[in-house]
Amino acid sequence: MEMADCKCPFCFQQFSPQKAAFKAMTVFTEQDFSAGMEEEELELKKRYELATDQIYQSFWTRYPKSEPENSYKDYPVIDNLSDRFLHGTYEMDSSGFVNRAVDAFGVSSKVRICPYCHNVLPFEFGKYPVKYISVVGITSSGKTVYLSQLLRQIETFFVKAGLTVVGTYDEVDRFLEDYKIQKNVPLPRGNAADGLMPPLALNVKCNKTQQIYTLVFYDIAGENCVRPEQMEKYGPFIHNSDGLLLMIDPEQFLGSLTQDGDFEKEAHSPDKVIAAMWNAFVTSDNKEGRSSIPLAVVLSKSDTQTEVLDYRSALFSNISYAGYTDYEIPLKDFAATDMEVRRLLARLNRNKTDILCNKLNECFPAHAFFAVSALNAKPQEHRDTYEEDCYMLDEEPETVRVEEPVFWLLYKLGALPVKEAETKKKRSGLLRKIFS
């Protein structure tokens, strides 16, 4: 079966899923070679010797201290398209997808790797259409905590919207283990501004259409979108995104340049991150000057805004799924949230809201506003076991509406059905612009 080319979730080079490389499971070390071994046997085993994979190493040299756990990184490479590496016998599953390679010793491997950067690909990667979603926000905006809480409960969220998680990957399990969100446990410090968190992938099936998609989430520091020296390293993650989720900390939105030199927060304000992303990664592909990439603007820590917004606001309570008949999301729910958040932002800072909205209209017209809380509790300062400052929760965390912006992005990407009756209703010019 002919399959469409896919893009590596690490280096974004295109290749046919049927021509992926593999890591061989047969491995020899120096102690396996004896003086009395025949030359032909020695030569064959030498080709399967454990050795540094220079291609893999070259990729992660660009992201110091970010290399993920990889037990196979120095294993031999099977790549039938290159004479530089071993050749093997490729085998397919019942759908014609190449899912394993057998080496010269008859040992099979299911560890598929990108033929260009040799990073391990998620299981069955390339078999289904892939949707890349980048979560962007400056350090401390809450990206990592948000992703942890979202992925920890994603099956529960998705089933309510007619989606079934049919496969998660080791990377997601490791991420959830490393970034636990629990009472009396230090909150994760998040990804370093110049670090790269490995892609977090899962396979999701739309119950209505029966189509399976591979969703790939990235955690991208907003600082890397405004620093010219970081553009080359992090630009591809924005440029290749199918959808963007921009996290905004309320304090970041309120922040301003002060006499004390608090320039960092101002330099990385939401509108500047948006402009930097557009200038560096979007304009080259959009002659009309506007990006078609859907962008969800998400106000994090919404539970802290009770003094600004009526506590009875829907933003302070979880989504009511009562109206999700046939598991289809009413478009009016997205519209109601969008308008409520716009009102909230205007009360926080009218001038910044006008600047932000203008930037979005001109750069990313396919956008909508959301508000979430990944904790619904105020973290308290503590000292961890290493006597370092940290934050902990004195109560069990709860999430509020964390799934809503992802639902909207999946709807915009054609992976999540919505109620058709809602799309036919007459709407205002603003809502038509956002949701059509």
Image (tube, rainbow, N blue to C red):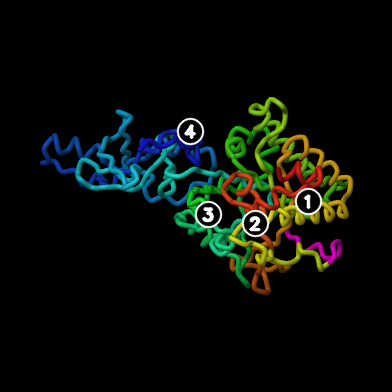
Main secondary structure type of the part rendered in magenta: loop
Say which amino acid is labelled 4: Gln
Q: Which residue is labeled 4 in the image? A: 13
Task: Name the front one of labels 3 and 1.
Answer: 3
Q: Residue at x 48, y 53 (%)?
A: 171
Quarter of the figure with the N terminus: top left
Name the kind of residue labelled 1 in the image: Gln
SS for tag 3?
loop
Query: What span is in magenta?
Result: 300-310
Which-is-in-front pick, marks 3 and 4?
A: 3
Farthest residue toward the bottom?
395
The residue identified by callout 3 is 208
At 77% from the left and 35% from the top, the residue drawn is: 362
| Residue bearing the label numbered 1 | 252
The local crowd at label 1, few if under 14, some if 14 to 19, many if 20 or more residues have their Cα within 10 Å, is some
Splitting the image into 4 quarters, where does residue 106 fall? top left
- Position of residue 372 relative to residue 297, above or below, is below
Whole-angstrom CA distance, mark 4 to mark 1, is 35 Å
Say which element carries label 1.
helix
Local secondary structure at mark 2:
loop
